[in-house]
């Protein structure tokens, strides 16, 4: 049996003044119910709807959408920190079976 491939994603800085970074999955979506169960291991789920899940991770806010789009926001959030957070988030989501 072949090893599972790591989901591909990329991180983009859409607005430097808002200290926000967009993270998108390539060709994958998110099961928000599974995300809600997987993410408390690394953060705190603040609110959720069928279309959106809001999570606090450290001093940062994470908005997840079923489309596979995520927004990371926070003071002093830089590209290096955003990439580290994205990796941590994806590990939790993979383990929770939330990436579909």
Image (cartoon, rainbow, N blue to C red):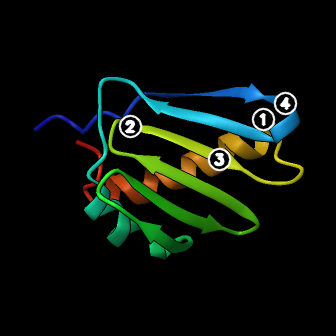
The Cα atoms of the two marked residues, 1 and 3, are separated by: 11 Å
Q: Which dot, 4 or 1, sits closer to the camera?
A: 4
Report how far apart the C-alphas of labels 4 and 1 lie in the structure: 10 Å
Badge number at residue 39 = none
In percent of width and height, residue 82 lies at 70, 43
Q: Which callout, 3 or 4, points at the residue further toward the start of the chain?
A: 4
Q: How many marks?
A: 4
Q: Are marks 1 and 3 in contact (CB under 8 Å)?
A: no
53 and 10: which one is in front? 53
* Residue highlighted by disc 4: 16
Residue 46, compared with residue 64, is above or below; it is below
Q: In the rendering, at what x and y percent does residue 71 appear?
A: 59, 43
The mark that comes first in sequence, 4 or 1, is 4
> In this figure, which residue is indicated by the disc labeled 1?
79
- Name the disc covering residue 68, or none: 2
> Earlier along the polypeptide chain: callout 1 or callout 3?
3
Label 1 or label 2, whichever lies nearer to me, is 2
Q: Nearer the viewer, residue 50 or 40?
A: 50
Asked if disc 2 and disc 4 are in contact, CB closer than 8 Å, the reply is no
- Which of 41/63 is in front? 63
Give the residue displayed 51% in from the left and 62% down from the top. 54
The extreme left residue here reads: 1
How far is disc 1 from disc 2 in space, using C-alphas? 19 Å
Mark 1 neighbour class, 10 Å CA radius: few under 14, some 14 to 19, many 20 or more: some
Given this view, does label 1 or label 3 mark the residue nearer the observer?
Answer: 3
Q: Secondary structure at mark 3?
A: strand
Which residue shows up at 48% across the image and 31% down it?
A: 24
Q: Give the Cα separation between the discs numbered 3 and 4.
A: 12 Å
Q: Which residue is mark 3?
A: 72
Q: Are marks 3 and 4 in contact (CB under 8 Å)?
A: no
- Closer to the chain start, of discs 1 and 2, is 2
Q: Residues within 10 Å of mark 4 (few under 14, many from 20)?
A: few
């Amino acid at each position: 049996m072949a090893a599972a491939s790591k989901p591909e994603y990329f991180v983009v800085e859409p607005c430097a003044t808002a200290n926000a970074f967009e993270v998108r999955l390539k060709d994958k979506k998110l099961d928000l119910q599974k995300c809600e169960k997987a993410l408390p291991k690394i953060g705190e789920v603040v609110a959720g709807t069928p279309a959106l899940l809001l999570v606090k991770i450290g001093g940062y806010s994470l908005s997840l959408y079923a489309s596979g789009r995520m927004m990371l926001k926070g003071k002093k959030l830089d590209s290096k920190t955003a990439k580290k957070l994205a990796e941590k988030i994806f590990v939790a989501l993979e383990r929770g079976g939330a990436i579909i």
